[in-house]
Each structure stands twice: as structure tokens, then as C-alpha cells.
Image (cartoon, rainbow, N blue to C red):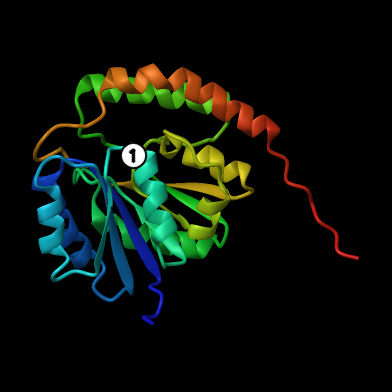
Amino acid sequence: MLDAPRLSVVIPVRNEAENIGPLIAEIEAALPALPHEIICVDDGSTDATAAVLAEAARSAPLRVLRHRLSCGQSAAVISGVKAARGAWIATLDGDGQNDPADIPALLATAEREGPWVLIAGHRVVRRDSTVKRVTSRLANRVRGRLLGDATPDSSCGLKVFPRALFLEMPHFDHMHRFLPALALRAGARVVSVPVNHRPRRHGRSNYGTLDRLAVSVLDLLGVAWLLRRGKRPELIES
């Protein structure tokens, strides 16, 4: 049996045939001496993503999981983390906008601040459209006010956390937007670290502004309910 890697890089991907190959190569360049695995979860892609991943797996420590039908980004992250063998998880989006070169610094921060911690990327300079930047900024403010997650960029896909922490969280659709709040609910610390953000090179986002707004209110109310109901007893052994 192979030794467990130190880090599992989990990438949810859907219809990113032009972006995912270069992204995997960048991850390998960023982690030359770190024992790691890459897990790509193909969330029901209908383009050539599956073929690109099969080719990439010939030379990279890549494991490919596939959802027969698209179940959403959160479901892909959940599938990837459950399958991971590393004690630490790094997540990033499959569109190439997150920079894999930031992963080593985030992991070093996690190991220094840990073991029960979530490191959240903070895209200080966003490379998105004006509409997307404005709506994201507004969503972060509303989320921070309602949930008290004290995270300036909760929706950044680049995060590092212990696999065990993620497995303690409640799993539901769109949970990836609320990982800092869910980590706090699980008794973890949350630390934000500035990261690079890049323009999308190919294709277009699978998630539009209206899609995000349509689910945000119900999601916020649901997570707020979870936070109020989440109690962690302090155990005293006798």
C-alpha cells in the first residue's frame, strides 16, 4: 500500500478542458518536493475534460473521479475530500484563476497555526468583471454580518484545512461558499492569507451572478440556523 501523501489537492471541475491541463502542470511545478496527490472531480462535464484528465494522469500523481451527472461544486468538493488520503487538503477552482504557487505558503501557515485551522485565500486584487467584483463584495459583507465568520473573501476557492475538520462539517449543496463559518462552528480557527488571482484564460464561468443570488438568501438563513444550533460541549474526563 502506498504511503499517504502529506497533502491532497482537490479540484472540482466541469467543462474546463482548456484550463485543467495547464493547471495540473502548474500544481506539479509548485509542489516539486512535497508528497502530494491531485484529485480532480469531474462534475458531469460534457466537453473534452475527461480526455484531458486521462492524459494528464499519465504523468502526474492524479486521481480522477467523475459524477455521471452534474451535482454542483460542493458535491464535487465533498467527493474529492472523502476520497483523499492526505491529512491536509488544499482546494482550488478548476478554471485556473487561483494560483497554485500560493499553496506552499498556505500549507506552511496551516501547519504553523494548526492543527485545527482553516486557511482561507483572500483575493486582494480580483481579476473578474466589475459586476462580479461588486456582487461578491456585497455578499461577503452580508455574510460576515449575519454569520460573523470574520473572513474578507469567504468564496475564494483556494483554501487549506485538515481533512478531519471537513469531515466534521455538515455537508450540503453550496456549502463551499460557507467553509469559514462551518469551520468556526466545528471549533476551528480561521486565518485569511492574501493570494494571487488571475483572469480566466478560456471558457466562461459555470456559475452566473443570478445563480449565486438566487440561492444566497436561503443558504445564509440555513447556515445561520446551523450556527445557532451548533454547541460543542467541553469534556471533562474523570
Left or right: where 232 falls relative to 188: right
Q: Quadrant of residue 133?
A: top left
Circle 1 is placed at which residue position? 73
**x and y percentages locating residue 182 in the rendered image:** 55, 40
Q: Residue at x 14, y 39 (%)?
A: 46
- Could you say which is closer to the camera, residue 223 or residue 50? 50
Q: What residue is at 23 percent from the left and 51 percent from the top? A: 99
* Quarter of the picture holding the N terminus: bottom left
**Residue shown at 26%/28% (left/top)?**
207
- Please indicate whether residue 93 sits to the left or right of residue 90 in the image: left
Relative to 46, does residue 90 appear above or below in the rendering?
Answer: below
Residue type at mark 1 is: Gln
* Residue 108: % across, % down: 42, 64
> Quarter-wise, where is residue 73 in the image?
top left
Q: Is residue 224 left or right of residue 201?
A: right
What is the quadrant of residue 27 in the picture? bottom left
- Asked whether residue 22 is in view, the answer is no
- Indicate whether 205 appears above or below 122: above
Q: Residue furthest front?
A: 68
At mark 1, the secondary structure is helix
Query: Can residue 171 be spotted in the picture?
Result: yes
| Image coordinates for residue 144, horizontal then vertical, percent | 51, 28
